[in-house]
Image: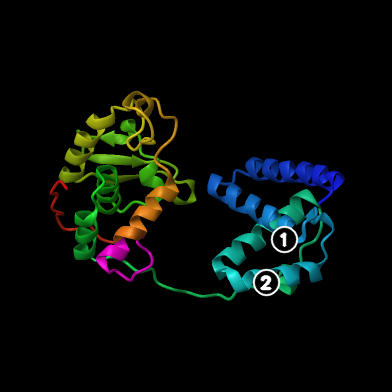
Amino acid sequence: MNHQEQERFSRLYEKHLKTLKLQGKAQKTIEAYARAVRRVSSYFDCCPDNLSPENLQDYFADLIETHSWSTIKIDRNGLQHFWKFVLKKEWEWVEIVKPPKVHTLPDILTPDEIQMIISATRTDRYRVFLLTTYSMGLRLGETLALEVGDIDAKYQRVHIRQGKGNKDRIVPLPDLTLMVLRTFWITHRHPKLLFPNPNGSPETIRQATGPMDRGGVQQAMKAIVAQCGIKKKSQFTPSATVLPPISWNRA
């Protein structure tokens, strides 16, 4: 896009981010809806404010070929927000794209599969991360966000903050998980984070401002699952029931 269009897009994009924040959207939602606007702008190489319904139909027809319906739905919602709250235009989404309603059950790992994955993990921080995630039925982002102050060792419980739907909850803390977390924390002694960014010297890690990289955890998980020969897709689906005791043998 030319310089004038780029400036117009930047103004509208910043307004898009502002309206999302003012509506109290979760950070992941903000990122997804922002990505939707960037993607359609990149596709047409122009500011998307003058795109017609026909343009958007062509765009989504191509997007369906390379992305899941889940992504299509998120992008549709992101663009709908952009049209309604930024451009102040009507959004006839039914006529543009309508993802099918599909009700599927997630793949739940069995206790034996979880034990296999943890045993096959050779990097300590990932082993501790996976044990923590599965033993307490957490989501990936919830484990990454854990802080020292969230652990109540006396009553063996953990305060999960801003989980799905931006809701807090309390979950039981198994004996083994508490022991392993204590041992792992001693290796970095970060004053706040349980899983700080591990890059750099010990002093750098103690001063890290953020947790381990989400993408790095996901890639490590995929590699371990492939190594174990597990074909299920939803490896980070929280367990629906309390797991039986998991053995912990240091790699």
As drawn, is 66 to the left or to the right of 106? Answer: right
Residue visible at 24% across and 53% down in the picture:
121
231 part of magenta stretch = yes
Query: Label 2: how many residues lie within 10 Å, few (<14), some (14-19) or many (20+)?
Result: few
> Circle 1 sits on which residue?
43
Amino acid type, residue under disc 1 in the picture: Tyr
Find numbered disc 1 in the image and state the secondary structure of the residue it sits on.
helix
Marks 1 and 2 in Cβ contact (< 8 Å): yes
Image height of 203 relative to 142, above or below: above
As drawn, is 230 to the left or to the right of 250? Answer: right
> Circle 2 sits on which residue?
62
Q: CA distance from mark 1 to mark 2?
A: 10 Å
Amino acid type, residue under disc 2 in the picture: Asp
Visible residue check, residue 238: no
The percent position of residue 154, horizontal first and vertical second, equals 19, 33
Q: Quadrant of residue 62?
A: bottom right
Task: Give the residues in magenta.
Answer: 225-237
Residue visible at 57% across and 70% down in the picture:
69
